[in-house]
Image (cartoon, grey):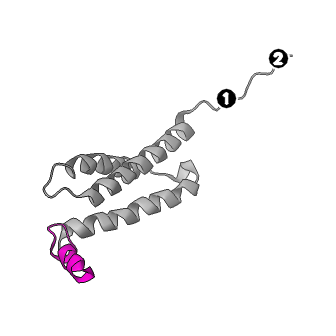
Amino acid sequence: MATSKLQALWNHPAGPKTIHFWAPTFKWGISIANIADFQKPPDTLSYPQQIVITGTGLIWSRYSTVITPKNWNLFSVSLAMAATGIYQLSRKIKHDYASEAEPVVAK
């Protein structure tokens, strides 16, 4: 039973013998690295990097549901990339453009 399931996975059109399997696997590494960067101060974040991560996540989350066979691993990692990218961009924008004016104290 386990052998037949392993053989089915191995011979699947999106199985380990194809790029459709490995590309999302490496993208998980990028998502995990972006999650680790949540601890970094916002001034060290890069707009171009986070825009690319967000854009890639949004584009591929849509495309992964159109291709045949549907690649749910690609879909889930793309959503994770988009979510982490949007979060990082919001942190960076708040840091760079949010009002940092001192409150006026009435005398």
The three-letter code of the residue at mark 1 reads: Ala
Nearest the eye: 12 or 27: 12
In this rendering, position of residue 60 left or right of residue 27: left
Where residue 101 is drawn, which disc sits there? 1
* The quadrant where residue 40 appears: bottom right
* Location of the N terminus (image quadrant): bottom left
Dot 2: what SS?
A: loop
CA gap, disc 1 and disc 2: 15 Å
Give me the residue at 16% from left, 49% from top: 66
Asked if residue 58 lies in the magenta stretch, the reply is no
Crowding around mark 1 (Cα neighbors within 10 Å: few <14, some 14 to 19, many 20+) is: few
Nearest the eye: 19 or 91: 19
13 in relation to 10, above or below: above
Task: Report the residue that reaches farthest toward the front.
Answer: 1
Crowding around mark 2 (Cα neighbors within 10 Å: few <14, some 14 to 19, many 20+) is: few
The three-letter code of the residue at mark 2 reads: Ala
- Whether residue 47 appears in this view of the structure is no
In this rendering, position of residue 85 left or right of residue 91: left
Residue 34 spot, x, y in % from top left = 46, 57
Task: Report the residue that reaches farthest toward the right.
Answer: 107
Residue 44 spot, x, y in % from top left = 53, 53
Q: Which residues are magenta?
A: 1-17
Where residue 26 is drawn, which disc sits there? none
- Whether residue 35 appears in this view of the structure is yes
* The quadrant where residue 28 appears: bottom left
Instruction: Pick whichever of labels 1 and 2 is earlier in the sequence.
Output: 1
Where residue 106 is drawn, which disc sits there? 2
Nearest the eye: 22 or 94: 22
95 in relation to 84, above or below: above
Give me the residue at 18% from left, 66% from top: 14
